[in-house]
Image (spheres, coloured by chain):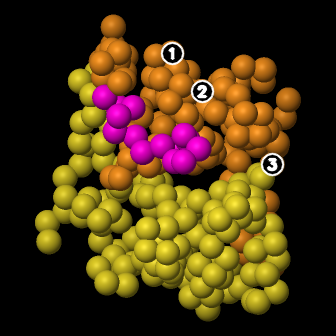
Chain colours: A yellow, B orange
């Protein structure tokens, strides 16, 4: 087992302690930022409930809670654009997660690498990346 | 005027169009991720209302909405740890902001560079950065 794999070999007790450190909101959710682990590109923000946090840590495949579908959302389950978990951080007050991920394919449903492809300029919003070729 | 400054010279009409593109939540807020513009370090996540977005774009100094104090929060107003706006992006569905910032001093109230200084390891949460010296 490599050092990186060992670093993410969580046992049930460690996961429970982490869950106790997270401040879930009134809806039982916490925002999670997905950041590409190697170059730091911020890919997306989605939400997790306790079950999604637990599954993400147990499987090392990033799983969110879909607020629109009101169900567990295993990122890439249909598209194949999975996120492998590399690191898992929480912020000072425990109400935001920062995930270092190894992203397969585009993160965005528009087929762009990142969901943050619109940037404010003097002319309004401009698109700064193109959809990836299929 | 340099090219970068010109890029962020927003007029009132551009700001209004941007505001119309943002999906504020039921509380009138949107999460904003602050990322250090040069090395990609994610510093913090905080919230903005329409007024905070407008002030951030007009002044190029990042301003949030403090949910705990229920007031406008001009980041660094008391600490001096201001965030100068470098870039301002929104995501595909308009419900998250990504700010490229030039951070003065630590971003975190614990005096650490980033609020995300706790990382999950096999032993539970470990601190991965120290508070900066005063």
* Looking at the image, residue B13 lies above or below residue A5: above
**Circle 2 residues within 10 Å: few <14, some 14–19, many ≥20:** many
Label 3: which secondary element: loop
Does residue A69 appear to the left or right of B116 in the view shown? left
Does any portion of residue B120 appear in the rendered image? Answer: yes
**Circles 1, 3 touching at the beta carbon (< 8 Å):** no
Mark 1 residue element: helix
For marks 1 and 3, the one nearer the N-term is 1
**Image position of A125 with respect to B1: above or below:** below
User: From mark 2 to mark 3, how far is it between C-alphas?
Assistant: 26 Å
Which span of residues is magenta-colored? B17-31
Labels 2, 1: one chain: yes
Residue picked out by circle 2:
B63
Which residue does the image show at 24% across and 64% down from the upper left?
A111
Residue on which the image places disc 3: B130
Image quadrant for the C terminus of chain A? bottom left
Position in image of residue A68 (x %, y %): 43, 68
Reading the image, the residue beneath label 1 is B59
Residue at 35 percent across and 15 percent down: it is B12
Q: Residue furthest left?
A: A133
Host chain of mark 3: B
- Percent x, y for residue B131? 82, 43
Of all chains, the one bearing label 1 is: B
Decide: marks 2, 1 in contact (CB < 8 A)?
A: yes
Task: Indicate whether residue B19 is drawn in magenta.
Answer: yes
Left or right: where A52 falls relative to B87: right
Which chain letter matches label 2? B
A84 drawn magenta: no
């Amino acid at each position: 087992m490599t050092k990186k794999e060992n670093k993410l070999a969580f046992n049930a007790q460690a996961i429970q302690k982490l869950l106790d450190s997270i401040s879930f909101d009134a809806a039982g959710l916490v925002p999670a930022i997905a950041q590409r682990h190697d170059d730091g590109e911020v890919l997306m923000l989605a939400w997790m409930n306790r079950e999604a946090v637990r599954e993400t840590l147990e499987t090392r495949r990033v799983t969110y809670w879909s607020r629109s579908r009101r169900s567990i959302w295993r990122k890439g389950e249909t598209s194949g654009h999975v996120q492998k978990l590399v690191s898992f951080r929480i912020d000072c007050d425990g109400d935001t997660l920062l995930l270092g991920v190894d992203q397969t394919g585009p993160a965005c449903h528009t087929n762009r690498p990142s969901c943050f492809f619109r940037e404010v300029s003097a002319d309004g919003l401009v698109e700064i990346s193109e959809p990836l070729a299929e």
